[in-house]
Image (tube, rainbow, N blue to C red):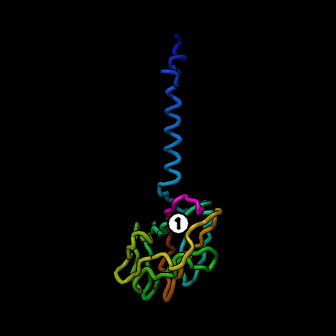
Amino acid sequence: MSSAKSNFAFSGGNNPNRSISNRLNETGIYLRDQVQTTKASALITIPAGQATTNNELAKFIPANSLVTSLGIFFTENANIDTSGTLAVGFGNASADVSIVASTQLNAAGTDIVINSFTSTSSKHALTSGGTAIALAADSALWFGNESSLFFQTIVGAADLTALCQVKVVMEFLTVSNS
């Protein structure tokens, strides 16, 4: 018998590779339907000057997704001048904060350090006197179609001393609403 045939030998009328294939299919279905998935954006720049900025993360939310958490990862220090503040929010359209209401992350004039992370699931305040972000009451969190996510930043009262870059992190489940 050649080695090629022995790799596909049948045992008791069943091909063992079929069993492996079935297990991989079942594992894939479980992972697709039951395991929480995460997604991170590319770097987003928060401008140094006092302003409200609305960033569209185009097609960020996959179809049939139930968003379970949103977060912000600071890849740089947010050096905030004197009485400055930094607020963020998330929504379904530009200038909309219906998913996470606009939330001031720091006490006035308090810097946010590099590698800080806050999310709606961790409920972690980034600075003493700052506020953790939370999902807004009555926010629609299931998306039947691939959708954009809008991330709003507000630099208020004073400038940042330099640009700051962050990443948006999302956790979601793939689930049907029927």
Total tally of numbered discs in the picture: 1
SS at badge 1? strand
Viewer-proximal residue, 68 or 96?
Answer: 68
Residue in the picture at 63% in, 65% down? 147
Left or right? Give the position of 109 relative to 93: left
In the rendered image, is residue 81 in sight?
yes
Q: Is residue 101 above or below residue 147?
A: below
The x, y position of residue 24, in whole percent, is 50, 39
Q: Nearer the viewer, residue 38 or 72?
A: 38
Residue positioned 45% across, 66% down in the render: 75
Crowding at dot 1, Cα within 10 Å, few <14 / some 14-19 / many 20+, comes out as: many
Left or right: 128, with 77 as reference point: left
Measured from the top left, where is residue 23 in percent x and y?
49, 38
The range drawn in magenta is 171-178
Q: Residue flagged by tag 1: what amino acid is it?
A: Val
Q: Quadrant of residue 66?
A: bottom right
What residue lies at 51% left-to-right and 77% top-to-bottom? 100
Please state the horizontal and vertical placement of residue 155, each as a whole percent of the image.
Answer: 52, 82
The residue to which callout 1 is attached is 67
With respect to residue 9, does 33 lie above or below?
below
Can residue 47 be seen at all in this image of the molecule?
no
Q: Is 99 colored magenta in this rendering?
A: no
